[in-house]
Amino acid sequence: MAGRHLMGMIGGVVADAEPQTSMVERAIAGDELAFARIVATYHEDVARIAYFVCGDLDIAEEAEQATWAAAYRGLKDLRRQDRLRAWLLTIAANEARQIARSRRRRRVRELALADAGRPTDQDHAALLDLADAVGRLDPRDRLIVGLRYVSGFDSAEIGQAVGMSATAVRVRLHRLLERLRKDLGDD
């Protein structure tokens, strides 16, 4: 099921005041509009984490589609409906990682800049350095950094997504940030 097609079905309207659990229950019961609302609500988050994990727009788009197909099939198995966002982002990250691994290709990563004026050559170089440093991380480490700094997960949520304790996640994040600072010469 194509996420963009579903968003068009509901005119891009994001789920209003409907409780998330009700929306999930209706989607499980076969209500396509309820599932379309889930897609509309979480599409940007899914796209962002997929791209961050793989660094390739084509792979990220493929991962998004695979995420929505997997979510549609697996929604009935979701144990905690209040954890829908975390569940979806974990699926997206895993799909991006698997697709990237199967393609075994690397591309230059392009980072979008906020429109805060024209970036300088120095800003551009710093972003390229950051993209390069992040790209050298192990895919699992990129996932942990992405879930924290792109998707805003806390250490407990990340731990649940990657099978680690919250404490282990905090230690791993600390070490990863130190490594990135060292790689960037930002002591």
Image (tube, rainbow, N blue to C red):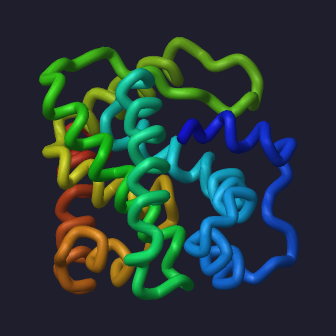
- Considering depth in this image, is 107 or 183 the residue closer to the camera? 107
Residue 122 image position (x, y, % from top left): 49, 19
- Considering depth in this image, is 149 or 139 the residue closer to the camera? 139
Does residue 183 appear left or right of residue 113 in this picture?
left
Does residue 57 appear left or right of residue 183 in this picture?
right
Q: Quadrant of residue 102?
A: top left
Please, is residue 12 above or below residue 61 in the view? below
* Any part of residue 19 in sight: yes
Q: Quadrant of the N terminus?
A: top right
Instruction: Tell me which residue sits at (30%, 46%) in the image.
Output: 95
* Any part of residue 187 in sight: no
- Considering depth in this image, is 161 or 31 the residue closer to the camera? 31
- The single residue placed furthest to the top in the displayed view is 121
Instruction: Tell me which residue sits at (18%, 19%) in the image.
Output: 105
- Considering depth in this image, is 88 or 131 the residue closer to the camera? 88
Residue 92 image position (x, y, % from top left): 39, 51
Does residue 3 appear left or right of residue 143 in this picture?
right
Residue 131 image position (x, y, % from top left): 35, 30
Residue 72 image position (x, y, % from top left): 48, 58
Q: Quadrant of residue 73?
A: bottom left
How many marks are shown on the rendered structure?
0
Instruction: Tell me which residue sits at (27%, 77%) in the image.
Output: 159
Please, is residue 81 above or below residue 123 in the view? below
Please, is residue 45 above or below residue 66 in the view? below
- The single residue placed furthest to the front in the displayed view is 30
Instruction: Tell me which residue sits at (18%, 53%) in the image.
Output: 140
Please, is residue 79 above or below residue 175 in the view? below
